Amino acid sequence: MRQLDDLAAAHRAERFRRVTVEVGPLSGVEPDLLRRAFSLLSPGTRADGAELVINSSPVRVHCSGCGVRSTVPLNRLTCASCGDWRTRVIAGDELFLRRVEMDTSGNEEPAHVH
Amino acid sequence: MCTDCGCGLPEHQHHAHPEIVDVMTPLLAENDRVAAHNREHFDRAGVLAINLMSSPGAGKTALLEATIERLGGECRIAVVEGDLETENDAVRIRRLGVPAVQICTTTTCHLDATMLHRALHELDLAEIDLLFVENVGNLVCPASFDLGQHLNVTLLSTTEGDDKPAKYPVMFRAADLVLISKSDLIEVLDDFDVAAATEALRGLGSSATVLETAARRAVAVEPWLNWLRARLSDRRSQKPVAVAE
């Protein structure tokens, strides 16, 4: 919410239409709970009524043994190809604010509904 | 027609174009900023900071007591205790002559960097070599909040079951060292296998060292103390202290 406040101030936004976050299964954040928190915190702010889009990419690892990149379950991060456990997570642990769509005060023309 | 988006409306009626901004900042950016600040404090003072995590009752405080008794003569230790309520754990630590600050989180299930930063003001870092942060007993949320620590140590007690790493992948993946605590109970438990726990941990792609400890038995904490001595030695020689990614 603080990040949205800062963005609103920087872009002279009147309200947010859509807020997109990346929340990977390995981030430790539960999308449903984040959605609930957003609906509790947004009323009375510029994000009131904004659509919260939560993207979640599958967990992928890169194997340092055989070099293969594979998609794996979140509690089995070994290489799906050769089984080696010396892997590095390359996707699925994201936790960041990707994009915001907002109405800025720069445009004085009335908004219409699509 | 609108020349901006081609929506077909006369220009004078045109809607306000929503401004789209790609942000790409971590949701926990504010916590990460304070954590980096804490880490700077530690590094400037030459303090090794260890975040101790586990489920409630896995024996974090008992392990700290055993550690202070045996390692207290070799280095200057301090402890920050995180609990929802009570000062009990800090009292236990202070009884051993070691400075301890209690953070009562009341309803919050984890420590964050700002809480730790506030607690650090009550400690003289120049007088400390080794700082333990005993996180709130919880195998979920503490893993998501960087405190500025150098290393994460996660306890897995033998009564919890050897499949815990597969059940709580986020927590165990964050661990630099996993301690199988209450290992003296293995002989009376028929369902805990250290090899199976290690296998579950490797299943997370983790190369973390696994050591057994039993806080009530002097000999059983020695491998853990040796691990700490090695990290402290790295710290003194200004080598990077992290043992894993």
Image (tube, coloured by chain):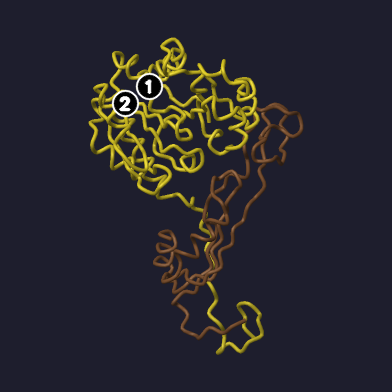
Give the residue type at disc 1: Arg
Q: Nearer the viewer, residue B178 or A47?
A: B178
Q: Which residue is mark 1?
A: B235
In the figure, what tint was chain A given? Answer: brown
Looking at the rendered structure, the number of numbered marks drawn on it comes to 2
Say whether residue B220 is left or right of residue A92.
left
Across and down, in percent, residue A78 comes to: 68, 32
Q: Is residue B167 above or below residue A57?
A: above
Say whether residue B92 is left or right of residue B218.
left
Give the residue type at disc 2: Gly
Q: Which chain is yellow?
A: B
Across and down, in percent, residue B193 comes to: 62, 21
Earlier in the chain: of badge 1 and badge 2, it is 2
* Residue sitting at x 63%, y 24%: B191
Callout 1 touching callout 2 (CB < 8 Å): yes
* Residue sitting at x 42%, y 20%: B231
Tag of residue B46: 2
Say whether residue B209 is left or right of residue B51.
right
* Residue sitting at x 56%, y 84%: A112
